[in-house]
Image (cartoon, helix red, strand yellow):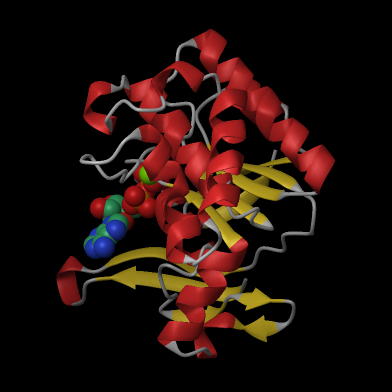
């Protein structure tokens, strides 16, 4: 991203989060973003993930200004290339764990059998084989978080973005998730940008960037 500024609101109420921010993310990189609460980490991740438009500046993918795309092309780009795990997971409460993971594949119109077997494999890797048919509301916070990770990975995105993915996990489950992320990065070349307060996870990344006063500093 190049020369990005983001302002919420206007006049006396305006919140200026970034001013002329540059960030280059290379293919295959694992990046942690850390910083105080309210520093703008979630907003930054949403801009990288094309969910939030900068007030000024550009978000470039392969040199192309992604926000020049039409809304429908942008949605398609996101569905195909970006896997997002939100701070609040936004799973569908009426559906089972398995159905939630399968959902992006069903929306993309892929063959059901194929989606199901890939979803089962992902849930198994995340230690959720015993929770497939449970509804989201019947799962613990940590289990819901892992379902959200599996859902984000289903369509094999090239960019994985996660907002505090291990925030609700106990240390053992958290470690399993961290190791899985590193494995996915190394095996599939999955580029990842992860907002985290977890220093163990940050230490497993190639780079850690700290967001302070609207600027990113390499740690
Ligand atoms: N849609 C929005 N409208 C107005 N203010 C917002 C919006 N989103 C975030 N903010 C404000 O921007 C600041 C940074 O928010 P956020 O990116 O969530 O920070 P972090 O994830 O680092 O805690 C906060 O003060 C928040 O209230
Ligand atoms: Mg946040």
Count of marks, rendered view: 0
Note whether 4 is above or below 90 in the view shown: below
Is residue 124 left or right of 31 when viewed as pictured? left
Rendered image quadrant of residue 208: top right
141, 19: nearer the viewer = 141
Note whether 141 is above or below 115 in the view shown: above
Is residue 39 left or right of 216 when viewed as pictured? left
Note whether 92 is above or below 11 in the view shown: above
Is residue 32 left or right of 11 when viewed as pictured? right
Q: Position of residue 44 (x, y in %)?
A: 48, 58
Note whether 174 is above or below 26 in the view shown: above
The residue shown at (74%, 77%) is 62
Q: Is residue 174 visible?
A: yes
45, 92: nearer the viewer = 92
Q: In which quadrant will I find the C terminus? A: top right
* Residue sticking out furthest to the front: 113
């Amino acid at each position: 991203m190049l020369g990005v500024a983001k302002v919420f609101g206007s006049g006396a109420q305006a919140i200026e989060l970034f001013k002329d921010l540059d960030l280059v993310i290379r293919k295959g990189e694992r990046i942690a973003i850390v910083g105080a609460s309210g520093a703008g980490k979630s907003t930054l991740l949403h801009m990288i993930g094309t969910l939030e438009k900068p007030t000024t500046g550009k978000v470039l993918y392969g040199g192309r200004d992604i926000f020049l795309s039409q809304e429908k092309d942008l949605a398609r780009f996101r569905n195909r290339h970006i896997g997002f795990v939100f701070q609040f997971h936004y799973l569908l409460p009426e559906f089972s764990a398995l159905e939630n993971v399968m959902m992006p594949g069903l929306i993309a119109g892929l063959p059901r059998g194929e989606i199901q077997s890939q979803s089962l494999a992902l849930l198994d890797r995340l230690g959720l084989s015993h929770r497939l048919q449970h509804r989201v509301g019947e799962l613990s916070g940590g289990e819901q978080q892992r379902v959200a990770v599996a859902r984000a990975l289903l369509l094999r995105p090239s960019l994985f973005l996660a907002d505090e993915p291990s925030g609700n996990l106990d240390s053992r489950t958290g470690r399993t998730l961290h190791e899985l992320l590193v494995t996915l990065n190394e095996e599939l070349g999955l580029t990842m940008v992860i907002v985290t307060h977890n220093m163990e996870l940050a230490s497993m990344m190639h780079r850690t960037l700290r967001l302070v006063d609207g600027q990113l500093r390499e740690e």
